[in-house]
Image: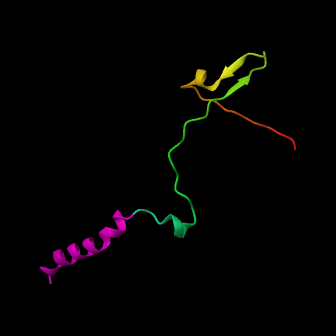
Amino acid sequence: MKDSLPVLGLVALLLGAPAVWAGPDFASMQVAPYGPPKPAPALALLDFQGKTVRLADLKGKVVLVFFWATW
């Protein structure tokens, strides 16, 4: 019995290994996988002083663009 324990452990490892290597099943979880971020489009807006601010000028900085509309 003692000699069969390493063999049983190896069998259990080999049977469980594909589940570890397989990626998550997003379809069964009804979620979409996260994709890598896309570059922001070219954007130019006026600031409060009427000066044009381009998104490219703010590269490397944190930018929050808040669009608000009433329709």
- Above/below status of 70 relative to 11: above
Q: Nearer the viewer, residue 28 or 41?
A: 41
Q: Residue furthest left?
A: 3
Tally of marks? 0
Q: Position of residue 14 (x, y in %)?
A: 25, 72
Measuring 50% from the left and 45% from the top, which residue is drawn there?
36
Q: Is residue 55 left or right of residue 22?
A: right
- Above/below status of 35 relative to 31: above
- Above/below status of 30 relative to 41: below
| The image quarter in which residue 10 lies | bottom left
Q: Is residue 21 left or right of residue 65?
A: left
* Magenta stretch bounds: 1-22
Please state, as top left, top right, bottom left or bottom right, where the N terminus lies in the image: bottom left
Q: Residue furthest right?
A: 71
| The image quarter in which residue 31 lies | bottom right
Q: Nearer the viewer, residue 56 or 60?
A: 56
User: What kind of colouring is applied to the model shown?
Assistant: rainbow
Q: Is residue 12 magenta?
A: yes
Q: Residue furthest front?
A: 42
Please state, as top left, top right, bottom left or bottom right, where the C terminus lies in the image: top right
Q: Position of residue 9 (x, y in %)?
A: 22, 74
Measuring 17% from the left and 74% from the top, which residue is drawn there?
6
Q: Is residue 38 left or right of residue 18?
A: right
- Above/below status of 50 relative to 1: above
Q: Is residue 55 magenta?
A: no
Dominant secondary-structure state across the stretch colored magenta: helix
Q: Position of residue 42 (x, y in %)?
A: 62, 30
| The image quarter in which residue 40 lies | top right
Measuring 61% from the left and 34% from the top, which residue is drawn there?
41
Q: Is residue 25 left or right of residue 49?
A: left
